[in-house]
Amino acid sequence: MDNIAEILGEKNSDSKQKKRDIELSTPADFTPPEELYKDLIDKIRTYHPSTDISMIEKAYKVASKAHEGQLRKSGEPYIMHPLCVAIILAELELDKETIVAGILHDVVEDTVMTSEEIAKEFSEEVAFLVEGVTKLTRLKMTTDKIEVQAENLRKMFLSMAKDIRVILIKLADRLHNLRTLQYQTPAKQIEKARETMDIYAPIAHRLGISKIKVELDDLSMSYLMPEVYADLKKQIDDRLVEREAYIKRIVADVKKHIDNAGLEAEIDGRVKHFFSIYKKMKNQNKTLDQIYDIFAVRIKVETVRDCYSALGIIHEMYKPIPGRFKDYIAMPKPNMYQSLHTTLIGPEGQPFEIQIRTYEMHRTAEYGIAAHWKYKENISGTVMQKEEEKLSWLRQILEWQRDTDDNKEFMNFVKTDLDLFAEHVYCFTPAGDVKNLPSGSTPIDFAYAIHTAVGNKMVGARINGRQVPIDTKLSNGDRVEIITSQNSAGPSRDWLNIVKSTQAKTKINQWFKHQFKDENISRGRELILGYCKSKGIDFAKYNKPEYIEKILKKYNFQDWDSVMAAIGHGGIKEGQVINKLIEEYNKDQKEALANEDIIEEYSQKKMNRTHGQGGIVVKGVDDVAVRFSKCCSPVPGDEIVGFITRGRGISIHRTDCINVLCMSEADRARIIDAEWQENAVEANTYMTEINIYADDRNGILFDITKILSEANINVNSVNSRTSKQGKATITISFEIKSKEQLNSIISKIRNVDSIIDIERTAG
């Protein structure tokens, strides 16, 4: 704890004046952090009375110190947010490690703390959870937003696969951010609401956490469709008293009959959430008055036997509507949801819905996977295996990640397939095994759900004993038999327009990639060699096993042929691969590389000594002028190299400088090793430059320069231009001590209203 305080104390020592300003600008009506923390502990005590809270208390102190001086858009101290996230996790009754990670979830991304420090002060487990929800801040901010979003999601899904609690923390984080979204700009509100509705609400649904999913849906709708939301809310409120009275009559009547039958049960009625009602109105093209099940009666009992007994009683009381009974107990939804649903004709001829479930089923319906992961260490391997099987959709996402390197294609899958599985058809193999598929699936989808080989060799299908066209839509309860032939020519490209499941599309695409792999490999090699020839690069120099290994790891390939095939079919650019090889080569060089003509200029120098100038140690030459290149503006903390210029000494570049990566073979011979001296930070300040991309508004430049002024940063120049679309590009040059200080400044500027992206100049 002392180490953390020491680390944070150094960084926050200049914030006394800011703290006074915070006290003046903070809203008077917020709950003090101390009270929120007490509420958190009280909630934990309700489900885990004997838990040791010392680690939670330590996390609270560390996070408070780390976020000291930071404000949310609402004006509240930033620590309020991680505490509220932790409270949501406590409402899901999660373990203390998850609670601790919830409190610390923003410290790596938004403060000076590192994952290593969290692991040391708490545990590797907590550090992994925090790292799992931390965005990939190293991505270039000029990258397409879809690319950035996709890379962050890829990381999150990989972390989820190792520990599902990662996504539980992320969902809690997103829920609290949506609860306070009113403080963001309209553009940011729409962006976050759309992302939530497309990705996070469907994930919550897949995990069965209706408690979070419902609120995410309704909050997102209120920002994406404010007029529709307000109108629907008013319509429901206007009918509320009348419909509540109707439901109360039914609840009383049902309770009387259930009690008379000797069943122990809890019975209540509720209004369905707004977004669910809106979807029904839209899908069925009906008005609110024509939607009869905006209210539902719920019956909770002890056992499955009691569920069916209650169903029998209900069907004796009211006439069931044909085709409106669903048995999710015998055939649970993929997200673990179990219940009996039946729609009935009630008093005065008005239809209504009843849901019947056990108390345990109700808990699973509310908390989903969280209800089962809570006590993971205490349940048997068999039970855990069954729970793991319920995450098959996550495995499909991971398979898709491995099979596509196109981020736009990956995002399209995430946005569509996550939601498609909300509606399923359940069909049977001839052996009686159940396959659940997206609504609208065909026998082709069914074949690939059995096995890739079955799909690839498919020539026909029978449904319920009758041969059918392969594009026939499947229905619940269908018995499907796939006809295969060893003489099959394989799938047709037309199948891609027929199948519904991404699993089938992926496997069909894989087949075509494999069939033409040799052609793609040859094409990839041609592109690589052509690229090197056009750039004057000696490919043989960089085509080494140790550098290729880095490529395979970076892009998740099994072998070099797979890289060539990916280049051949357009999955990855040849320039990306070559630049990565060159980057690894440069890192690996231990001796200075200089051409003979340049070395002769320094023949009288002592070639085996090092020289330090301006905080830089240049290996191999002495008494040479050192200057920092303006193209990439390196600062202490950046990886650097020297470049021997003609008559102007050594210029220092970042290793990721575009000018370094794109050098000709002749110029590469003039690269020389360089590193920062230990006293580089204390000895000098260093000029750097950043580009800020923002939605233009009055006062944005003032807000940005105020941050630099408060940090005592000396600004060299500010240039701003605005496009016809109202997008501002602001370029600022200023003096900085280190990369760490620069990252801190960038982090603060990112919190300014209307900021879209920030990047350092890199050549």
Image: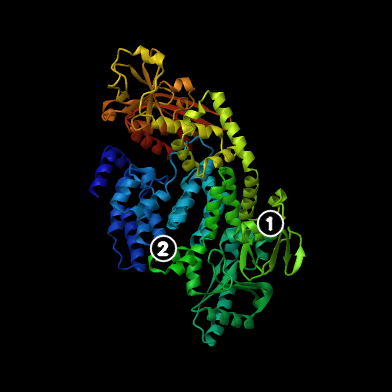
Left of 332 or right of it: where is 84? Answer: left
Label 2 is placed on what type of residue? Glu
Q: Position of residue 145 (x, y in %)?
A: 53, 40
Q: Mark 2, residues whose alpha carbon is within 10 Å: few (<14), some, or many (≥20)?
A: some
210 left or right of 417?
Answer: left
Going by the picture, which residue comes out furthest to the left? 2
Q: Total number of numbered labels?
A: 2
Could one spot residue 81 in this view of the protein? Answer: no
* Residue nearer the viewer, 188 or 545: 545
Q: Which residue is mark 1?
A: 457
Let me know if residue 551 appears in the view.
Answer: yes
Q: Residues within 10 Å of mark 1 (few under 14, many from 20)?
A: some
Q: Is residue 546 above or below residue 169?
A: above
At 32% across and 24% down in the image, what residue appears?
Answer: 619
Task: Give left or right: position of 156 versus 3.
Answer: right
How far across and how far down the image is residue 359, in percent?
48, 74
Closer-to-camera residue (622/16): 622
| Residue under numbered circle 2 | 91
In the image shown, does 339 or 228 lie closer to the viewer?
A: 339
Q: Amino acid at mark 1?
A: Lys
Q: How is the image coloured?
A: rainbow
Image location of residue 267, percent across then percent down: 52, 76
Q: Nearer the viewer, mark 2 or mark 1?
A: 1
For marks 2 and 1, the one nearer the N-term is 2
As helix, strand or loop, the secondary structure at mark 2 comes to helix
Identify the residue at image location x=29%, y=47%: 65
